[in-house]
Image (tube, rainbow, N blue to C red):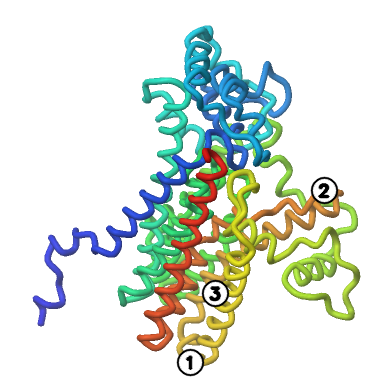
Amino acid sequence: MLRRAIPSATAARSVPLPLALLLATALVLGLAWSVVTAPLQAFDESEHVAYAVHLAETGDRPAVDGGRGTYPGAEAIALDQLGLRRMLQNPGVKPAWRDRDAQAFDRAQDALPADAAEAGDGPNPLAKNPPLYYALEAIPYRLTPGGFLTDLQAMRTVSVLLLVLTTLVAWLAAAELFTRMLPRVVAAGAVALHPMAGQISGIVNADALLMLLSTTALWLAIRAFKRGPEPRRMALFGLAAGGALLTHGRGIALVPFVVAAAAVIALRHRDDLRRAAIGAGAALAGLALCGLVLKVIGGGTGGAYGGEANFDVGGASVRGFLSFVWQFYLPPLETMGARVGPEYGFRQVFVDTGFASFGSYEVVLPEAARAAVQVGLVGAFLVLLALGVRHWDRLKAHALQVVLVGLFAGAIVGFLHLASYRAILGGGDPLITGRYLLPAIGAFALALATIADRLPRRAGALAAAVVLVGLLTLSTMGIGETLLRSYA
């Protein structure tokens, strides 16, 4: 009996075959996205690359305003001579890939002065971002021999590896909650096969690291909830959330999550209040340390968050905000006033730009695919609600666990709604888009895993197959459409 209960050291160290296959799939899909997406053609990649190159060459960030130019020398030449600037959001234009174009580009690169790579000192609107992701991307840039396109592919590959790590973390989070293999496969597969996660991880974009750190923060919070608020564990939780602060302005959404999660974890382990208090303090200390680093490095860049966290705008009210959020998802009630802003809501953010629009949003999957995504998302939500009602006693027994994951998703999505409300009241556009939801992908993955786990065994296996095959189909379609857009 004891022998069966305690796995061998070799078994403990082995990687389950389903996990190994999912990690390999994430790697293959990420690399496929990195190859089929033409250089600098997706989600502000040109500015992200310019930031990373300037940081690698000078040790400084570019300026939000001012400077000699947005793009370093080789990147500027690539944008012009290879037709990449004209190609942005212009589906009728393809890159200039003929031999003579490539040869002219190579000659132009070779003729650049030694300090040309330092030229991209601004203006760069992404210079408001903290530098953690760009410092990471500076490593392959410095280590890779060859010209600009080789450097770019190496930098994209680092983002692909971030997707592989996020897949692993999603598996680990599910392993804390589920004893069966199936929900773990669904959770990790929901990340590895997600088309927008693949696209973001196939280019140079800080959202890839933000997705990893946010998912890691969720995993560590769940781990502390299940195993106890040990100081080291809680400090790592705070540091993961703090790393998101150092990656992107949207990482600020994890600040209230850390505070609320520390309280939930302390409540779960209230039998030892001293240990719970020390653990909560360790989490807040890790977060505060990253906040201090951000404060030290944040000067002179126009603000690390570019005002994203400032919601003090004219006309804002709690009632107006709640009405705004309601009408984002549902038709207005009779007591509600007119909708604030354009007709932009659940379909546009969660479906169209969340699963089915790539490149610079000019590569769009067919309407049938988008409709299927919408039906799937709404259906999954309704099934999750039905399972909660059916297993109400079990839900009550795990209420704090559900609250913890809900706080994570609520903090991220709620921040996006606040930012959108502020932007619209300030006279801007809705601001948010589907890829901004990727930091919450861990909650999405665990929700799908819960459905697979709580449905009857055959129904759960069928649901898991539908989800994973559906996501793989969307990813394959997206890769194919992007290939045709870029090179056909």
Secondary structure at numbered mark 1 = helix
Q: Quadrant of the N terminus?
A: bottom left
Above or below 180: residue 74: above
Q: CA distance from mark 2 to mark 3?
A: 34 Å
Q: Earlier in the sequence, mark 1 or mark 2?
A: 1
Q: Residue at x 47, y 51 (%)?
A: 198
Q: Is residue 318 left or right of residue 157?
A: right
Q: Which mark is residue 393?
A: 1
The crowding category of the residue bearing disc 3, from other C-alpha atoms within 10 Å (few below 14, some 14 to 19, many at least 20), is some
Q: CA distance from mark 1 to mark 2?
A: 46 Å
- The amino acid sitting under disc 1 is Asp
Pointer 2: what residue? Answer: 428
Identify which amino acid the numbered label 3 is placed on.
Val
Image coordinates of residue 258 in percent, x first then y, are 54, 59
x then y, percent, for residue 71? 61, 23
Sooner in the amino-acid sequence: mark 2 or mark 3: 3
Query: Toward which corner of the image does residue 160 lie, by quadrant?
Result: top left
Amino acid tagged 2: Gly
Q: CA distance from mark 1 to mark 3?
A: 15 Å
User: What label does residue 403 carry, if any?
Assistant: 3
Vertical placement of residue 396 versus 56, above or below = below
Q: Nearer the viewer, residue 432 or 146?
A: 146
Tag nearer the camera, 1 or 2 = 2
Observer able to see residue 288:
no
Q: Residue at x 39, y 63 (%)?
A: 188
Tag 3, which secondary structure?
helix
Report which quarter residue 377 is drawn in: bottom right
For residue 461, what is the image quadrant?
bottom left
The local crowd at label 2, few if under 14, some if 14 to 19, many if 20 or more residues have their Cα within 10 Å, is few
**Is residue 447 found left or right of 43 in the rendered image?**
left
